[in-house]
């Protein structure tokens, strides 16, 4: 009952929610008949009025009075009771879900009870007739699980093109170019970037916006983190966006929604606009704004479908999300919240990890890893493993921040330091000087001591060199296998 009152109160307070909620609920879903009457009246007033007349308690009471139903629903004071029952209109979708779920349960109870009664007292003909009706009712109930699609289609796709002998073409990633010649994010798909705070996740996605604008395309940003238009414009200008493109609403659209209804309107606007690149920053703020429980997979899935709509019209949608703090949760590779988030990613899902923290006047470096690549084209362009390379932000020059995505010359495919020339020199020294210490190796091989230590560690981890304690706890090294750079499939030159 509380949910029914709250959802009706939300519609009186925020009439623009009516069209959206109509995809979730029907009048018969309400348990109390008076509430069904009010629901129908709200939608009648919303669609029948013109000009400046909007749905509110006064116009709604007037309509109910004309139809002779005002007293039956409890009079005008009851409309104010409904408004008082709704503290947060943006939670209306959550209230609607409670109503819809209970309506389904009542349908199952009513249908089952009727079948029990017929089985005990009825005739075979009555049972057969009612079974047919019951199956239809139950089928309709199952079909209504979640929001209904208003498009009259079964989702059927014609695969007769297979007989032409032409293999389907899977487009590679389109936006944010890597120095290796490929891109990171897919057009027409949902992509994601996640990581800890201050790992330049938003910077990375904003570079895709700059790239699209400077390529003559269009872009949009939904800023649910509320960085503000001044901060966002300044950031995009720093990254190289042309002022004329940012100032042109047909080229770039910036949204700073404050509540759920504004967010829905922003998504609809962007979907109509068909922007090439759409940045949504960030998921952690969007779900509460929509009144969704981040621990409920069904609710998260519904929310993701809503904000993923621009991808259906060809946009490259990029979500920003954050890693959890708990060690066990971080190990899963999922961002904060339900695994439904990861399922929604149909493009690339990239994890950002700090190597050198970006800061004004400095060069920041962020390691990038592929967490998911549904189409497989990003992995195809990457030389094995998950490691994509580093996102490098150079802020050493005033009024401009240059950027690039490139692979390190001395890093393995999993992002680890791998100076292969130095590794071979160490291996040769250990072969010729069995039981040598780490100090012996550093003095004989030369180079930066920290690089020698890292190269020796790789040789030990990969089984080329063993280490054990000697006299006075000295660490002694022994050659197990000969390491040669020319035989290393992951060889990377280290200058």
Image (spheres, rainbow, N blue to C red):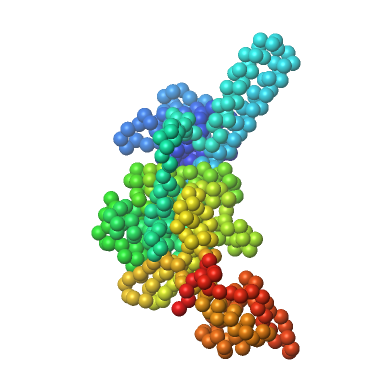
Query: Split into 4 quadrants, where in the image is the N terminus?
Result: top right
Q: Is residue 147 left or right of residue 164?
A: right
Q: Is residue 12 left or right of residue 136?
A: left
Which residue is located at x 74 percent, y 16 percent?
Answer: 120
| Front residue of this view, candidates 247 and 210 | 210
Tally the numbered discs.
0
Which residue is located at x 38 percent, y 68 percent?
Answer: 403
Q: Which x, y percent locates residue 18?
A: 44, 36
Classify residue 109 by image quadrant. top right
| Front residue of this view, candidates 239 and 12 | 239
Q: Is residue 285 left or right of residue 137?
A: left
Classify residue 472 by image quadrant. bottom right
Which residue is located at x 35 percent, y 31 percent?
Answer: 49
Work out whether residue 85 can be spotted: no
Query: Split into 4 quadrants, where in the image is the C terminus?
Result: bottom left
Q: Is residue 395 above or below residue 58?
A: below
Q: Which x, y percent locates residue 128?
A: 65, 14
Single out the residue that lies furthest toward the left: 244
Q: Is residue 124 above or below residue 196?
A: above
| Front residue of this view, candidates 146 and 392 | 392
Work out whether residue 380 can be spotted: yes
| Front residue of this view, candidates 413 and 232 | 413
Q: Is residue 251 above or below residue 431?
A: above
Q: Which x, y percent locates residue 180?
A: 40, 63
């Amino acid at each position: 009952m509380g949910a029914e009152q709250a959802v009706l109160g939300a519609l009186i307070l925020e009439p623009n929610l009516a069209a959206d909620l109509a995809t979730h609920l029907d009048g018969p879903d309400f348990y109390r008949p008076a509430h069904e009457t009010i629901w129908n009246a709200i939608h009648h007033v919303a669609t029948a009025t013109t000009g400046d007349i909007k749905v509110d308690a006064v116009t709604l009471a007037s309509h109910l009075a004309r139809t002779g139903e005002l007293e039956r629903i409890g009079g005008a004071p009851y409309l104010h009771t409904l408004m008082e029952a709704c503290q947060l209109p943006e939670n209306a979708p959550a209230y609607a879900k409670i109503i819809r779920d209970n309506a389904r349960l009542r349908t199952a109870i009513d249908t089952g009870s009727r079948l029990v009664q017929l089985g005990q007292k009825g005739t075979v003909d009555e049972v057969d007739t009612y079974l047919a009706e019951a199956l239809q009712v139950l089928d309709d109930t199952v079909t209504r699980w979640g929001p209904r699609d208003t498009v009259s289609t079964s989702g059927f796709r014609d695969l007769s093109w297979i007989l032409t002998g032409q293999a389907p073409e899977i487009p590679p990633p389109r936006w944010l170019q890597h120095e290796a010649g490929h891109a990171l994010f897919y057009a027409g798909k949902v992509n994601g970037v996640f990581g800890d705070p201050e790992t330049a996740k938003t910077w990375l996605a904003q570079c895709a916006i700059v790239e699209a604008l400077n390529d003559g395309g269009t872009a949009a940003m939904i800023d649910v983190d509320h960085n503000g238009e001044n901060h966002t414009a300044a950031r995009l200008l720093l990254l190289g966006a042309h002022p004329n493109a940012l100032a042109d609403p047909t080229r770039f659209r910036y949204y700073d929604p404050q509540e759920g209804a504004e967010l829905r309107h922003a998504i609809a606007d962007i979907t109509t606009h068909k922007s090439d690149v759409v940045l949504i920053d960030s998921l952690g703020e969007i779900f509460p704004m929509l009144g969704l429980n981040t621990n409920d997979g069904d609710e998260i899935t519904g929310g993701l479908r809503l904000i993923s709509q621009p991808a259906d019209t060809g946009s490259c949608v990029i979500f920003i999300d954050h890693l959890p703090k708990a060690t066990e949760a971080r190990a899963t590779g999922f961002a904060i919240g339900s695994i439904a988030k990861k399922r929604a990613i149909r493009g690339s899902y990239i994890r950002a990890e700090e190597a050198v923290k970006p800061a004004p006047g400095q060069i920041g470096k962020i390691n990038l890893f592929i967490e998911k690549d549904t189409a497989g084209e990003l992995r195809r362009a990457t030389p094995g493993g998950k490691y994509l390379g580093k996102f490098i932000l150079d802020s050493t020059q005033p009024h401009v921040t240059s950027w690039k995505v490139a692979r390190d010359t001395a890093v393995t495919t999993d992002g680890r330091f791998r100076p292969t020339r130095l590794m071979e020199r160490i291996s040769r020294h250990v072969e010729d000087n069995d039981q040598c210490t780490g100090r012996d190796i550093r003095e004989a091989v030369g180079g930066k001591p920290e690089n020698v230590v890292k190269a020796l560690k790789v040789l030990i981890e990969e089984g080329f060199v063993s280490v054990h304690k000697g006299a006075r706890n000295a660490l002694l090294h022994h050659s197990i296998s000969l390491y040669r750079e020319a035989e290393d499939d992951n060889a990377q030159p280290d200058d």
